[in-house]
């Protein structure tokens, strides 16, 4: 599997099991060791590659341990400190990493709770770990732009110089994106004033401030909605679908009408794809990609449901998302292509049916 597929597979496992994990040791075994082995490609059972409970005397701290040390080409390269899944990560949790970073040859330190990974290096002072991470990776909210940076730390493609050289840019881009996200959630007065001055020539009075606070908030929400719709169109509207290509499986002609899209991605039949449907599709895709390449898993929206298909073939259904009514249903199939609808209240409940989705991926082998 490509690294993106491996990350998606681990994310599906985390989503499915995180509620049952309550200790640091369980977090290591369930999530962190698979990250080291499955994603980064190191042999967790070879002490020449991965050293658990790595110990070194650091000043007056004798016998203090870091959870894992990763060795590459005989040199200590990466230190990893683990906290329990769900724990907040802060620099206060990284005291061992700070001390070990200063006394070993490692240039990369990772603080993780199994779901979120904070990557540190020494941008500010040589051989002193920075207080701010240069990269933050959340496996359940994966920023695909960061995947190539994680790739550089894998065993087969280890490129420390490239990681360190890119670290400063990654750090500031990450900080800027989080600052922008904060403004989109709750714009402050300075942000509102700056945007208002670009479109309004009058004095920025208190009345104008309050008026534009509402207008700026509404404009930003609409802007985000437009961006989401563009992504949806790009994801689902890249091909022109015909009724012949989307013949229904069970004779449900009305329910099985396929999406017909123009070259510019607009739906020609009044079918609206919601963000919730796209997120549901992404969850099913993340589950099934442990069995088949993700490129084979395709979504087709209809007026009645979103179909998730193997090989873009309507005769190879993996699941259906019936989200167009008050009660949401997840439709799953047996080997005879009979559909059973399961009521769900939230998208997270899809993970409870992961085994059935994986089985469906093999029905058409």
Image: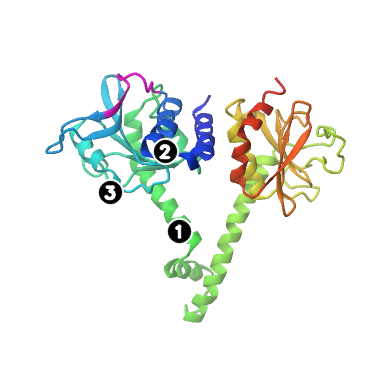
Tell me if mark 1 has few (under 14), some (14-19) or many (20+) residues whose alpha carbon lies within 10 angstroms of its own.
few
Q: Check disc 1 and report the residue beneath it.
A: 182
Q: Is residue 43 magenta?
A: yes
Q: Check disc 3 and report the residue beneath it.
A: 92
- Which mark lies nearer to you, 1 or 2? 2
Q: Which residues are magenta?
A: 42-53
Marks 2/3: CA–CA distance? 17 Å
Marks 1/2: CA–CA distance? 25 Å
Q: Left or right of 179: which side holds 93?
A: left
| Coordinates of residue 197 in the picture (x, y in percent) | 48, 70
Q: Is the stretch drawn in magenta largely helix, strand or loop?
A: loop
Q: Check disc 2 and report the residue beneath it.
A: 114
Q: Left or right of 146: which side holds 326?
A: right
Residue under the image location 67 percent in, 45 percent down = 233
Q: Earlier in the sequence, mark 3 or mark 1?
A: 3
| Coordinates of residue 49 in the picture (x, y in percent) | 32, 21
Q: Are marks 3 and 1 in contact (CB under 8 Å)?
A: no
Does any portion of residue 105 appear in the rendered image? no
Query: Does residue 48 lie above or below 272 as drawn?
Result: above
How many discs appear?
A: 3
Residue under the image location 81 percent in, 34 percent down = 246
**Which quadrant would the C terminus be assigned to in this image?**
top right
Marks 3/1: CA–CA distance? 23 Å
| Coordinates of residue 30 in the picture (x, y in percent) | 44, 32
Q: Are marks 1 and 2 in contact (CB under 8 Å)?
A: no
Q: Earlier in the sequence, mark 2 or mark 3?
A: 3
Q: Is residue 225 magenta?
A: no
| Coordinates of residue 77 in the picture (x, y in percent) | 29, 28
């Amino acid at each position: 599997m490509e690294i993106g597929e491996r990350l998606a597979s681990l994310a599906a496992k985390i989503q499915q099991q995180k509620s049952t994990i309550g200790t640091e040791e369980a977090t290591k075994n369930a999530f962190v060791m698979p990250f080291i082995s499955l994603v980064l490609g190191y042999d967790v059972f070879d002490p020449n590659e991965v050293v658990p409970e790595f110990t070194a005397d650091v000043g007056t701290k004798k016998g203090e341990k870091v959870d894992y040390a990763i060795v590459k080409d005989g040199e200590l390269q990466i230190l990893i400190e683990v906290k329990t899944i769900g724990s907040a990560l802060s620099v206060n949790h990284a005291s061992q990493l700070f001390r070990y970073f200063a006394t070993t040859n490692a240039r990369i330190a990772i603080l993780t709770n199994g779901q979120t990974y904070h990557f540190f290096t020494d941008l500010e002072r040589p051989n002193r770990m920075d207080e701010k991470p240069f990269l933050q990776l959340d496996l359940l909210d994966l920023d695909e732009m960061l995947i190539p940076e994680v790739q550089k730390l894998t065993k087969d493609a280890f490129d420390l110089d490239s990681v360190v050289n890119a670290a400063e840019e990654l750090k500031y881009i990450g900080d800027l994106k989080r600052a922008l996200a904060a403004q989109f959630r709750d714009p402050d007065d300075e942000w509102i004033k700056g945007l208002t001055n670009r479109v309004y020539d009058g004095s920025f009075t208190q009345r104008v401030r309050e008026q534009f606070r509402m207008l700026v908030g509404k404009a930003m929400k609409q802007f985000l909605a437009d961006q989401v719709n563009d992504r949806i169109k790009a994801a689902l509207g890249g091909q022109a679908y015909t009724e012949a290509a989307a013949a229904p499986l069970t004779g449900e002609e009305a329910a099985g009408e396929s999406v017909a899209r123009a070259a510019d991605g607009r739906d020609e039949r009044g079918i609206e794809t919601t963000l919730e449907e796209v997120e549901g599709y992404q969850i099913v895709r993340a589950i099934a990609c442990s069995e088949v390449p993700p490129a084979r898993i395709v979504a087709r929206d209809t007026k009645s449901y979103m179909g998730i298909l193997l090989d873009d073939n309507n005769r190879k259904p993996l699941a259906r998302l019936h989200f167009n009514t008050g009660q949401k249903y997840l439709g799953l199939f047996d080997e005879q292509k009979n559909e059973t609808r399961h009521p769900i209240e939230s998208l997270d409940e899809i993970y409870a049916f992961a085994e059935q989705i994986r089985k469906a991926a093999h029905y058409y082998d």
